[in-house]
C-alpha cells in the first residue's frame, strides 16, 4: 500500500451564517479577527492565525460557477455540501492529484489563482467540497 502525499495542515475553515453583518461583527469585534474581504450577501473572510476563516451565506454559495468562470470554485452550502481546505506545498499538489485519481476520486477543479498558488478540489464521501491548496493563494 502506498502512503499518501504529505499535507501541511489546514488553510481554510468554512462556516455559514444567514446574517453576514452580524457574523462579521462577532468575528472581528468579539473574537478579534481581522477582516480581509467581504462581498455583501455572500461572504466575509478573516485572518485566523495561520489559517483563514470563511463565513458564507449558504444561499449564495450554492450557486454553481458559470461555464466560463475564470476560477471555477465548486459550490457548497451549510445544509448541503460544506467546504474545508488543506494546505500542501506546490510540489505536493500534483502528487495529491495523482494519488486521489488513483483512488478513483474525481478532481472537480484544478487551477492557478491570479495571485499564484494552485488548488485542486474534490468531494469527500458525504459530498463536502474539499480543497488542497498551496498556501501562497492567500499571500
Image (cartoon, rainbow, N blue to C red):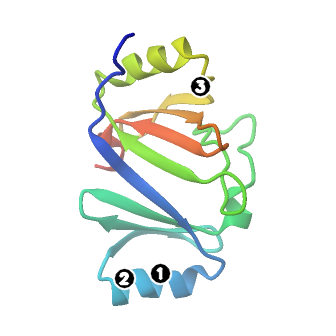
Residue at the extreme front of the image, as rendered: 1
Residue drawn at x 65%, y 44% is 126
* Discs 1, 3 touching: Cβ within 8 Å: no
In this view, 98 is above or below 136: above
In this view, 108 is above or below 69: above
Badge 2 marks a residue whose secondary structure is helix
Residue under label 2: 28
Residue under label 3: 107
The image position of residue 46, as x and y in percent, is 38, 68
Residue drawn at x 40%, y 18% is 94
* Discs 2, 3 touching: Cβ within 8 Å: no
Residue under label 1: 24
Badge 3 marks a residue whose secondary structure is loop
Q: Residues within 10 Å of mark 3 (few under 14, many from 20)?
A: some
The image position of residue 43, as x and y in percent, is 56, 67
3D distance between C-alphas at marks 1 and 3 = 32 Å
Residue drawn at x 26%, y 38% is 8
Residue drawn at x 67%, y 58% is 77
Q: Earlier in the sequence, mark 2 or mark 3?
A: 2
Q: Residues within 10 Å of mark 1 (few under 14, many from 20)?
A: many
- Between tags 2 and 3, which lies in front? 3
* Discs 2, 1 touching: Cβ within 8 Å: yes
Q: Earlier in the sequence, mark 1 or mark 3?
A: 1
The image position of residue 76, as x and y in percent, is 66, 52
Residue 115 visible within the image? no
The image position of residue 137, as x and y in percent, is 36, 43
Give the position of the N terminus as an image quadrant.
top left
3D distance between C-alphas at marks 2 and 3 = 34 Å
Badge 1 marks a residue whose secondary structure is helix
Q: Would residue 29 appear left or right of 85 to someone viewing this image?
A: left
Q: Would residue 39 appear left or right of 51 to someone viewing this image?
A: right
Amino acid at each position: 500500500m502506498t502512503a499518501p502525499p504529505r499535507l501541511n495542515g489546514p488553510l481554510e475553515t468554512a462556516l455559514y451564517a444567514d446574517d453576514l453583518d452580524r457574523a462579521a461583527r462577532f468575528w472581528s469585534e468579539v473574537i478579534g479577527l481581522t477582516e480581509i474581504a467581504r462581498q455583501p450577501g455572500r461572504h466575509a473572510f478573516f485572518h485566523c492565525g495561520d489559517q483563514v476563516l470563511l463565513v458564507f451565506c449558504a444561499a449564495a454559495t450554492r450557486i454553481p460557477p458559470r461555464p466560463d468562470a475564470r476560477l471555477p470554485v465548486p459550490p457548497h452550502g451549510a445544509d448541503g455540501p460544506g467546504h474545508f481546505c488543506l494546505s500542501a506545498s506546490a510540489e505536493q499538489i500534483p502528487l495529491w492529484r495523482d494519488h486521489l485519481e488513483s483512488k478513483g476520486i474525481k478532481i472537480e477543479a484544478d487551477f492557478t489563482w491570479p495571485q499564484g498558488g494552485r488548488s485542486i478540489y474534490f468531494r469527500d464521501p458525504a459530498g463536502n467540497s474539499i480543497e488542497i491548496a498551496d498556501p501562497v493563494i492567500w499571500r
